[in-house]
Structure formats: structure tokens, C-alpha cells
Image: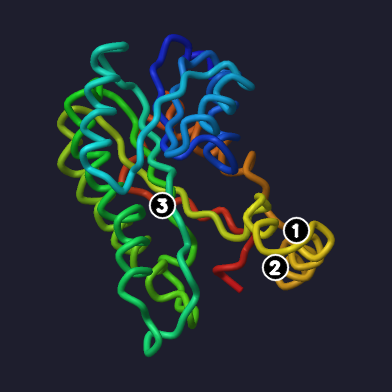
Amino acid sequence: MKNLTDKIVLITGGNSGIGYATAKEFLENGATTIITGRRKQAIEEAAARIGGQAMVADQSKVADIEHLAEEIKRQYGKLDVLFINAGITGEASLISDAQEDNFDHVMDINLKGAYFTLSKLIPLLQDGASVIFLSSNVASMNKPQSSVYQASKAALNTIAKTAALELADRKIRVNTVSPGPTRTAVLNKSYDSQTADGIWDDLAQVLPLKKIGIPEDVAKMVVYLASDAASFITGSDFVIDGGMKIS
């Protein structure tokens, strides 16, 4: 991926998980890489570990997104790659038990925040740039107690396709990547490490490939989509879920 040298890359939500792994992958391929996050200390420590640049921004706040755009313009003047990665799953609940604050929180980050991140940063995108949204395989599945999260990602997929058409005249490509179960630290927030490992292992057994994905699986796809090797790909969704969706 030598054609990423000297490219300016922005990744939202980059201090852990898929965002962090993707930042490392871009840096290893020569790109100048900026990661964002809500917590100043966490994002600065993450950037320092991998040699990236840190900018504090809360994707759920349009004012933060506008400030982020101003800072990128001031410091770099352009963007070649935009990976809109930040997102949350929210609380699991039946539709009949839905809470407005959970709905708003998920939609503010996953949908409104992602939408306005693209909107406010379009002026900085170079002709021929690449935009990648982190979606999910559940965007086209129907799982009980996941309606809000599923809806946020399904809407995101529609926005990505519309953006691909709107930006095509500038040769800006817009795609989505849709992971399935991916081993991050998310379960460790609710369970001890042994219990979390057991949940991952049990889940692996129901997938056709009998394995759980890792953040690096997604990172490599994102970097590929950002490269010239994917110059004829736009408006597409790439499912990375070990066969979960087809099973």
C-alpha cells in the first residue's frame, strides 16, 4: 500500500478496538494518521503509543465536529481518507421497553454524528479521496432487543450509498465495512476476563468459520478500500463476519 505515503487520514473513535487497529495499519503503510475521541487523556495516550496525531472531539456534538474540521484545515489543509468509525451499541431492549434517552444517545453518535462528520469534512476531502463508514452486519439482520442499533446502522448504509453518488464527480469513493462479532475489550466492561473469553468461545462455535474476528481483520479491509487498489469500488458494503449473515 505504498500509495498511502503522505496521505492524511482521519479516524473517529480511534483510541481502542477497530479504530485503534486501523490507525496502526495506516501508520505502518506510511500515512499521516489522526485519531479522535471524547476523552483527552485516552486519545493522547493512544496516539502516542502508535505515533499518530490526537484530536479531541465528541462525534455526537456538531460543534465538536465543526471545530475538528477547522483544526484539520489549519494543521493539514486537506484529507485523503476519512474513516468514520466511532459508534456505540446502546442498551439492549425490546421495542416495547424502549427508553428515549438510549434511543437519542445511539442515534446522536451512530447516525447524526456520522452524518455531520461527513458533511462538515467534505470540503477538506481531496478529489479521489476515500470515505469509509463502520457499519455492522446487523444492519441487514433482525435481532430482537437490538432495534435501535440496527436502525442506526441501516440508515448509515443508505447515507453512504447516497454520498457515493453525490461525490462521484470528484472521484471520491464512499463505502461501508460491516463487521460481525469482533474480539475487542467491549465484554470486559461487563465481565471478568475468564467469563468474557468463554462468551467469545461459545459465540465462535455458531459461526461457519468457527472463529471470532479481530480488529485487524477490519483494519486491513479499511486500508485496502482507502488505497488505489480499490479505485473502482464505491457504494459497496463489505461484510466481515465469518459467515454469520449467510448462516
Residue 187 sits in which quadrant? bottom right
Residue 17 sits in which quadrant? top right
Q: Amino acid at mark 2?
A: Leu
Q: Which mark is residue 108?
A: none
Front residue (pair 159, 73): 73
Mark 1 surroundings: few (<14), some (14-19) or many (≥20) residues within 10 A? some
Colour basis: rainbow
State the residue at coordinates (66%, 63%): 190
Q: Is residue 229 above or below residue 84?
A: above
2 and 1 marks in contact (CB < 8 Å): yes
Q: Which mark is residue 211?
A: 1
Rounded to the nearest angstrom, the CA distance separating label 3 from label 1 is 22 Å
Q: Amino acid at mark 1?
A: Lys
Q: Amino acid at mark 3?
A: Asp
57 on left or right of 220 = left
Residue placed under numbered mark 3 in the picture: 237
SS for dot 3: strand
Quarter placement of the C terminus: bottom right
Residue placed under numbered mark 2 in the picture: 207
- The picture places residue 22, in percent across and down from the top left corner, at 55, 33
State the residue at coordinates (51%, 30%): 43
- The picture places residue 86, in percent across and down from the top left corner, at 43, 45
SS for dot 1: loop
45 on left or right of 120 = right
SS for dot 2: loop
Rounded to the nearest angstrom, the CA distance separating label 2 from label 3 is 20 Å
